[in-house]
Amino acid sequence: MTRYQVSRRHIVGTFALLFASSALIWGCKTAGGPAGTEIPVGEFASLTGGTATFGQSVHNGDVLAIDEINAAGGVLGKKINLLTEDDQSKTEEAVASVQKLVNSDHVVALLGEVASSRSMAGAPIAQLSHAPMITPASTNEDVTKKGDYIFRICFIDPFQGQTMARFALNSLGKKRAAVLTDVKQDYSVGLDEAFKHTYSTSGGAIVSEQSYSTGDKDFHAPLTSIRATNPDVIFVPGYYTEVALIVRQARELGIDCPILGGDGWDSPELTKGAEKEFNNTFFSNHFATEDPDSTVQNFVKKYEDRYHSMPDAMAALGYDAARILVDAMKRAGSTDSAALRKAIAETKDFPGVTGHITIDPNRNASKPITIIKITEGKFHFAQRIGPEGEALTPFQP
């Protein structure tokens, strides 16, 4: 089995035990790359910190995919050696992680990050070094604008925001919306802008616009202002760490209308201790474990067998990102940076767990989106929307 090496800079004590199931083995790195017996691929992820469940899930997906690839003989006659750096959910650490992977470890490509702000921090380094970078889940529109070596296999924020606006109007029939946005996160701001534009130009009215910042704990003031406008629906495009508190506090204030969000909600930590409060909430996502598609169900079984838990969308995206990178290596017949960049850009109709993926001319993924409904703390499939905004399935209330 390939060795998965995680930087010792940030991971100590009991954290090593947490990742024992991911086949992490401590030790110094061995020579790899085009002239060695292994192909070094870098991963930078939030294995600790505020969005740790995102990074941990993506990492698990990456490891599962690469283990399968290596067990089948690897690629180009070599095994993949995944070199992982923990950026602690911090932008400055994402920069340091990418610098190390590119300049010291000489990786041929990068997988990561989840958070758009951290991907945009690392992307210029990857671009300058001509190291192709694939983010599994950074949805902010500006991420791939950092250069022609930067790709994503998730949909972008405008698509999420537009989809949730149409979902609120067409599927839920809600005409008056409030928005509560994390002004410290590019991700949240991007979804906010797309939602408001589509909602207001499609017959809906934005009745309140409120904000908060990452790390806030008390949301009573903005929620009280929202309550005074009596909205039919509230859009909260934030990360699960704050959303978990926002929804709980909204219900405490008697706000019982539907609350909507984006894929930043997708975490097993979201509803803990507030299962009933999350009734009548919905969020856009990349994947649903209830999807009967055989590709999805095969992945769910393999993930459960490996990690003894159900995969979330971040795990599925990590799995797809690693497989798309290796598929591009095969088609390029090389790990040469220019050839690999070209092959990734030519990815078309790749049969991913998160849908069939085509990389468009802007290095973004064209693919479907899934709407998840939360009931009693459980995530359920509600609707699938196509890349052109068309409803692919009826809404399941």
Image: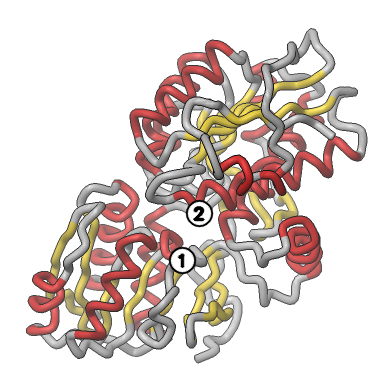
Q: Position of residue 342 (x, y in %)?
A: 65, 26
Rendered residue at 29%/68% (across/down)? 236
Above/below status of 202 relative to 62: below
Q: Quadrant of residue 85?
A: top right
Q: Quadrant of residue 111?
A: top right
Q: Position of residue 345 (x, y in %)?
A: 62, 34
For the residues labelled 2 and 1, the Cα–Cα distance comes to: 8 Å
Q: Amino acid at mark 1?
A: Glu
Q: Are marks 2 and 1 in contact (CB under 8 Å)?
A: yes
- Left-right relation of 194 to 370: left
Report which residue position mark 1 lands on: 269
Q: Amino acid at mark 2?
A: Thr
Q: Position of residue 77 (x, y in %)?
A: 90, 23
Q: How many marks?
A: 2
Q: Within 10 angstroms of label 1, few (less than 14), some, or many (20 or more) residues?
A: few
- In front here: 81 or 69? 81
Q: Quadrant of residue 30?
A: top right
Q: Position of residue 16 (x, y in %)?
A: 60, 40
Report which residue position mark 2 lands on: 53
Rendered residue at 10%/83% (across/down)? 229
As helix, strand or loop, the secondary structure at mark 2 comes to helix
- In front here: 395 or 182? 182
Q: Is residue 331 visible?
A: no
Rendered residue at 80%/61% (across/down)? 305
Q: How is the image coloured?
A: secondary structure
